[in-house]
Image: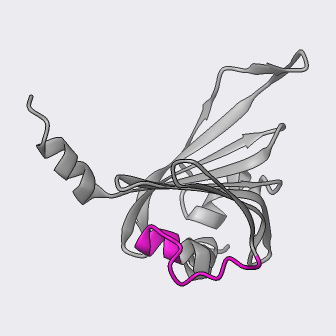
Amino acid sequence: MENNEHFLTLLEGHPLFRSIIKNQDFSGVNLKDQVYTEELGNIYNFKSMQVGKHIFKNVQVSISPQITMVTIVTDETIFFDEPVRYFNQEGYIQEAEPYLVDSVPVIELRRKLRTFQMLGRTTRLSVYKCIVYGCMIKFSFPNESKIKEIMDNFDF
């Protein structure tokens, strides 16, 4: 069985993911060969990205002073089906209310995992599985000091 190091180490070693996690930007990353679009509000969509043997259909990155979010979409549902192998934890499963696509009910499952460290930053992780998109892996990296600064400025 592979441990937590395998998949997460691949992500940490990838120049794009490493820069996003450590610096909350794309500094030092050569985007010349990447197919991506930039949306308003510091949201970037990267297409057909390969990390190790895994191919991601889409990687969406959203960067703000308070939080950095990374959403990975892939056809490989093994990330949901075998969480211990890829994330070294089982987590718990939630089933969302079904929705309709072309009059067919679609069920989306969510596996919520505990928080852990990646490159010295705390991350929250959820993995989704659905017949519509395959598998979606969502990482969030809150900037704890920035959130504390905002909360300290509120008068309660």
25 relative position to 60: left or right: left
- The answer to whether residue 105 of the structure is visible from this angle is yes
Q: How many marks?
A: 0
- The answer to whether residue 70 of the structure is visible from this angle is no
Residue 93, how many percent across, how many down? 59, 38
Q: Measuring 71% from the left and 32% from the top, which residue is drawn there?
A: 108
**Whether residue 141 is situated above or below residue 94 in the rendered picture:** below
- Magenta includes 117? no
Q: Measuring 51% from the left and 76% from the top, which residue is drawn there?
A: 19
**Whether residue 134 is situated above or below residue 1 in the rendered picture:** above
Residue 14, picture quadrant: bottom right
Closer to the camera in the image, 17 or 127: 17
Q: Measuring 74% from the left and 73% from the top, which residue is drawn there?
A: 34
86 relative position to 22: left or right: right
Q: Which residues are magenta?
A: 19-33
The residue sitting at the top extreme is: 103
Residue 142, picture quadrant: bottom left
